[in-house]
Image (cartoon, rainbow, N blue to C red):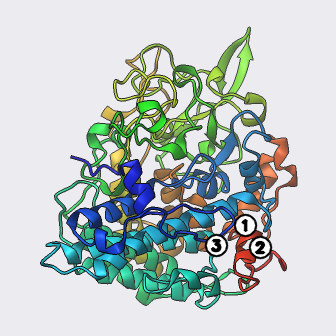
Amino acid sequence: MKLKYIIPAFALAATLAGCDENSFLDIKPQGTLSNSSLSNAKGVDLLTTAAYAALRNGDMFTPNTNWTYGEVRSDNAYKGGGGTGDGGEVHLLEVLDIDATWGNADVKWFQLYCDVQRCNSALKVLNDCSEEEIADLKSQKAEMRVLRAHFYFELARLFKQIPYFDENVDINAYDQISNVEFTRDQILGMIAEELTSAAEDLPEKQAEVGRVNKYVAYAYAAKVKLYQAYRQNDQTNQVESIDKNLMREVVQLCDKLEGKYDLLDDFQKLDLLAYENGAESVFAVQYSMSDGSGVDGGAGCYNRSMLLNAPQGPYSGDGFFLPSQNLINAFKTDANGLPLFDTYNNEDYDVITFVDGKAVNTQIDSNVDPRLDFIVGRPNITWKTYPNTPCLTSWVRNTSDYGYHCCKRFYVSPESPDMYKGWPWGASALNWQIIRYADVLLWKAEALIEIGEEAGLEQARQIINRIRRRAANENTWVKDFADPAKYAANYKIGEYPAAGWNQAYARKALRFETRLETAMEGERFFDLVRWGVAEEVMNQYFDTEKEKRVYYTIANFTKSRDEYLPISKPQYNFSHGLYKQNPGYGDF
């Protein structure tokens, strides 16, 4: 059974916090329960469950899924919706027209520090308990430390310069903690140390699905060390060196998951409830429906971060978060089924034209990676298992601004009994995968490539080909809606040969594979910054996309600024002028 992230309203109000929007963390007790009344198994359970519930925090335009911060801010996705003014705060991020007054920076910062404080609140009580009172005391404390590390990692990769503190700091001292006491590298190092240390006190398997185990901590530590290994200049945000010793630690940590997890045999199973906690799921936010929580008229604890993103058509959604034409083009392959690294964007794939009022797919002769139609909803192409119609152009709300393609991931098929009927549109109990085993494999391959040893390069090739073989399973390919005996496109995906596999080529293959395999999962922009190529990639993207999307005319990626979000003016005010602004944004 899933760990249900549900807190009775009275308990949540009493034990946790109201958050004053004008402050950094106004999380003083709002009810009558004291620490002494919580210092027992039942009371601690309320606090630890509340900390797990924080994984669900995030809402529409400030999502825990990072669809705005990690995808719309990258070359993978358009904002979508009704037009540039619909969700205007996200549009500003899409064209990188933000500063310290940008509201979503303040909301996200505040939200994540509230999440940190939930973990700290639980740890304060746990630290005063004994193993006689709570049998799994060490494990529960370690779980809270892993969750806290997760929230700090999100803060670090979004904002770079952040206050870092543990449960022992008095709440009244929060406004006295500098956001530049530690460098980016130091903060990532402390997060990684917290994770590896917590792993020692965690079991290999938890009785409740969804709770953090030893391998979650190891995998997350590998991710954090991977980021840390790309050493950035504190003033310019630019990658200056790559730490091979840290990369070796990444490999060692990833190896700890070998034999414990595996790839699902079908990429599309990632969006089926039956497999959401299956072999590939390492760490996931657990969602539920019709769970008695009373949320949204009884719908339950579904993924509110994706609330507005379902297409129209059978979902009746608001149609935000749409795949970019650049991403669609990236799935084209050559005669050997390998990516067109340097030429994929020379011509658009699947251009929709209208003949006698009917949408026609043109420029579709190229071979494509089959994952295209697992991830992107293309007009006239079969949509999951929906039998009524294929995907239609009418499923996009504003085609003049955003084209005709939808995001096909993260939703169950509309005829499925697992989908909630009515509002909230497209809601289901489908988990959000924070870490899946494909991620771990790609991190290991990346580390091996950057280490650059011959044996490691070959091992990386085998890993990347293993992921590609999953997509090469013809039994899983999307079939033509009108003629199920045919495939929906000229699918061709091949494996990388040993010939010509040197470090430079392997790096290019790894980065391309990471983009295709994890497209729309909220990671793309952070990958570009980690690799030190964000300015090059994004400005090239803007230069080509502005010919199709006029709103990109004003877009420009400013090196040594746009790698991170600004520290918001309200948070600067909270600190009484103590906080320092991130490079490139000027003075407060």
Q: Earlier in the sequence, mark 1 or mark 3?
A: 3
Q: CA distance from mark 1 to mark 3?
A: 21 Å
Q: Residues within 10 Å of mark 2 (few under 14, many from 20)?
A: some
Of labels 1 and 3, the one closer to you: 3
- The residue to which callout 3 is attached is 159
Q: Quadrant of the C terminus?
A: bottom right
Q: Residue at x 23, y 67 (%)?
A: 258
Q: Farthest residue toward the right?
A: 554
Find residue 376 and report its image quarter. top right
**Residue located beneath label 1 in the image:** 536
Q: Nearer the viewer, mark 3 or mark 2?
A: 3
Q: Please state which amino acid type lies under the numbered disc 1.
A: Glu
Point 52% across, 89% down: residue = 186
> Hey, what amino acid is under mark 2?
Lys
Cα separation between marks 2 and 1: 9 Å
Q: Which of the pair 59/159 is nearer the observer?
A: 59
